Amino acid sequence: MAEAEANDWKPERRRVSRRRKGRDPRPYLLAAVGLVLLVVLLIVIIRAAGGDSSETAESGAVTEAESTETTADAEAIRQSEEAMLQQQEEESLAAEEKAKQDVVDSYTNLGLIQLEGGYLNVRRTPAADGDIIGKMQQSSVCEILGQEGDWYHISSGGVDGYISSQFVITGEEARSQALDQVRLRAIVTVSDNDSLNIRSTPEINSSNIVGQALAGERYVVEDQTDGWIRIASGYISADYAEVRLALNEARKMDLKAMAISKYHNLLISKVSNYLNVRKTPSDEGNDNIIGKLPGKAAADILETDGDWYKIQSGSITGYVSANPEYVATGQEAIDLAMNTATLMAIVNTDRLNVRKEPTTDSGVWTQISKEERYPVVNQLDGWVQIELDAGDDEESDAAYISTRDNNVDVRYALDEAIKFSPLEELANQQATRRAKIVNYALKYVGNPYVWGGTSLTRGADCSGFVQSVMKNFGISLPRVSRDQANAGRAVTSSQMRPGDLIFYRNSSGVVNHVAMYIGNGQIVHAANKKSGIRISTWNYRTPYRIRNVID
């Protein structure tokens, strides 16, 4: 074994010995191999580099393609969404138009009101003097049930009556115009004998009531929020109104019930002339009088304070005696109100023109104030004839006011309290005399008007009244107002004092009425057969002349 190992080692050793004797070729071989490897490595690197560049270019191309594809997809989605929204909008408009058309189509024989202004009266019978039971505004509609001469028998807003065919269009023209008048409206759903308060703010508050809406009346909806519906004149509770697309229809004239519905706890004055309204619940003579409640005038009872009622009547809040001899409440008040309420013109603007005839071509002969309520003599389409003072004339002049532009509200109403403070007798002798004259004249408020009369108790006309009052203080005046207008000396409205006389003219421009100024912007005068001797605002109609006949 040892020998074999020795023999194996010997040849190798001999090879080594021979290599040492000549050059060793191994370094050259190794160099050659290294060079080959280097070339191979360079080729690999170059190929790798070329491959990466190609792959990068290819990747970039893919990325750009993907980006282009993504942009195209986004544009397609956007266009699709726009198309969808447009389609939805078109469908919504189409649905709305169909809904409006359905409203118009719900009328079998539709009539549409066309007026230059004001409103059209609905009458109980087909006659110009028929009782008025409703009114129709411009562009309101009705169902025409039949025709009698120049009158259409119609149904609209729960009113069944007759309207003049002169102011109604029908057929396709009416249907086409009606389509443009369909609006989102609130239709009042209270019972027929009730009313819905219209409030200035969307809250229940005793001080924010600005009007009443009756059953079936329709109002354009301006907004809806938190149980309230905003309409042009204020807010109404959503609990008592149905909101839907609809056309405007007739409004009922609930006659005298309308006058009573605005009072929640009605009180009616039972005195023949005026009941004092006081600032405090006590009788302090003239010191705490702030107003007068005319006979048969109405008020709301706010609370009871011993022997006094705290009331609200017109713009006056104060106290009146609770003595049942002076005031009526409960059913007694309702019965009195139903027998007393009269049709009145209530002006909604500061001054309103009065004309001789119911046409704008007629001359304006005076103006009236919103501070007064004027009895209605007759109602015409677009016009109202009111009663002004007879004065020294046996009959009142014809006086017409336009109902266009909603400047006047014609409805049954009750008289309400007026502001009044008795004049104090001052230390100055002249002022004392004027105060005595005025307070003496006021003693006869409520007494009758009698044409040609001079009696302060049995009846007097306007000039007879002031003549008799002044005569009691040693002041002599002519008998009729046109002559009295030249007595004494002229004063301006800024100079006038209690006891001065204010004169008014008739439609012919002739002085025919006189009143006595009592202070606080008010007069006392013998007005007409209906009103008797009463208190009014000094410019309830246009004043012509003011005269001082005392000094």
Image (cartoon, grey):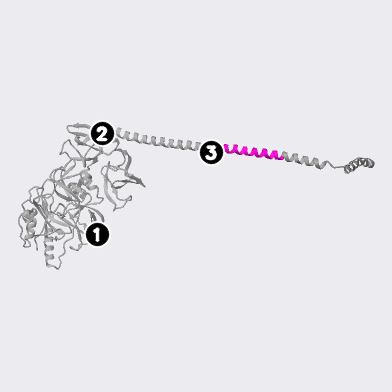
Q: What element carries label 3?
A: helix
Residue lying at the far front of the rendered structure: 22
Q: Mark 1 points at which residue?
A: 306
Q: Mark 2 points at which residue?
A: 174
Amino acid at dot 3: Ser
Residue lying at the far bottom of the rendered structure: 427
Q: In this view, does 401 lie to the left or right of 265?
A: left
Q: Mark 3 points at which residue?
A: 67
In this rendering, does residue 342 appear at all?
Answer: no
Amino acid at dot 2: Ala
Residue lying at the far right of the rendered structure: 3
- Camera-side mark, 2 or 3: 3
- C-beta proximity under 8 Å, tags 2 and 3: no
Q: Which residue is drawn at 30% across and 50% down?
A: 200
Q: Where does the image place residue 418, in percent across and percent down from the top left?
A: 19, 55
In this rendering, does residue 531 appear at all?
Answer: yes
For the residues marked 3 and 1, what is the alpha-carbon distance in whole angstroms?
90 Å
Which badge, 2 or 3, comes first in the chain's sequence?
Answer: 3
Q: Which portion, as a residue range, is magenta?
A: 41-65
Q: In which quarter of the image is the C terminus?
A: bottom left
